[in-house]
């Protein structure tokens, strides 16, 4: 336990300051180009995180590869809706012979170019309808008519629920609204540590972490 806590804190500060280092200057440039961003905290946070994820995303994806290969490749099928798609890395783990459409639910439009780039690598395309990008958050998706109710075979969440307020309620609504009868929800998330001291630090450090990582909480 005592070895885990210093390791957790070291990891937090390493990643936190690395995020600030890679995203601060480009974000300031965005503010200079569009000063009204200062009046839009959510939009500003998303601009910042888009730069963070450009640096962090590939390593996070690679770190989760063994889990995602076991979770997604043999199980995902049909129409796949990816909650908080990020750069669309989920597509790399989908069996294209079993998946007919990939729907990227990603409200951060700074991610969309990367989603299209990943899609091109994985043979998904907006032109043939096998790729759909929804620039909406989870709650707004429920009222959108782009994806019909009961039309999704596989709902996916990869390291996303940490950034959704009232995640349990929202997931329940998404499952009820989008999944076909017999559909499935596949998820891979980080959670509270079972160790009380580590868990306390997770909660204590979540506010600054959330500001850098677009709402993500450490627990």
Image (cartoon, helix red, strand yellow):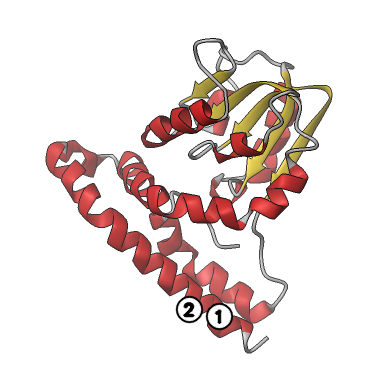
Of residues 76 and 170, the one nearer the viewer is: 76
Of residues 42 and 151, the one nearer the viewer is: 151
Q: Which residue is mark 1?
A: 7
- In the visual, does 67 lie left or right of 12? right
Number of residue marks: 2
Q: Is residue 118 above or below residue 208?
A: above
The quarter of the picture where residue 17 lies is bottom left
Q: Residue furthest left?
A: 32
Dot 1: element: helix
- Mark 2: few/some/many CA within 10 Å (<14, 14-19, 20+): few
The residue shown at (32%, 48%) is 48
Dot 2: element: helix
- In the visual, does 98 lie left or right of 137? right
Q: Position of residue 99 (x, y in %)?
A: 71, 24
Q: Are marks 2 and 1 in contact (CB under 8 Å)?
A: yes
Q: Position of residue 51 (x, y in %)?
A: 34, 48
Q: Residue furthest bottom?
A: 2
Disc number placed over residue 59 in the picture, else none: none
Q: Position of residue 40 (x, y in %)?
A: 28, 39
Q: Position of residue 14 (x, y in %)?
A: 42, 72
Q: Report, in whole angstroms, how far the alpha carbon at label 2 lies from the one at label 1.
A: 5 Å
The residue shown at (74%, 40%) is 186
- Mark 1: few/some/many CA within 10 Å (<14, 14-19, 20+): few
The C terminus, quarter of image: bottom right
Of residues 143 and 34, the one nearer the viewer is: 34
Q: Is residue 41 above or below residue 103?
A: below
Q: Which residue is mark 2?
A: 10
């Amino acid at each position: 336990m005592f070895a885990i806590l210093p390791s957790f804190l070291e990891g937090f500060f390493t990643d936190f300051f690395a995020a600030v280092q890679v995203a601060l200057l480009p974000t300031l440039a965005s503010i200079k180009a569009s000063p009204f961003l200062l009046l839009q905290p959510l939009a500003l946070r998303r601009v910042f995180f888009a730069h963070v994820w450009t640096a962090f995303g590939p390593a996070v994806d690679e770190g989760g590869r063994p889990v995602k290969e076991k979770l997604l490749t043999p199980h995902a099928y049909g129409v796949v809706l990816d909650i908080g798609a990020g750069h669309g890395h989920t597509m790399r783990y989908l069996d294209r012979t079993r998946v007919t459409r990939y729907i990227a639910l990603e409200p951060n439009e700074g991610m969309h170019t990367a989603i299209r780039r990943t899609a091109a690598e994985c043979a998904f395309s907006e032109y043939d309808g096998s790729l759909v990008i929804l620039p909406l958050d989870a709650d707004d998706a429920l009222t959108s008519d782009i994806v019909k109710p009961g039309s999704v075979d596989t709902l996916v969440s990869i390291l996303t629920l940490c950034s959704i307020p009232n995640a349990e309620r929202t997931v329940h609504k998404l499952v009820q609204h989008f999944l076909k009868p017999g559909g499935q929800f596949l998820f891979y998330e980080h959670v509270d540590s079972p160790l009380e001291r580590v868990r306390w630090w997770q909660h204590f450090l979540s506010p600054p972490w959330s500001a850098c990582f677009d709402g993500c909480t450490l627990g």
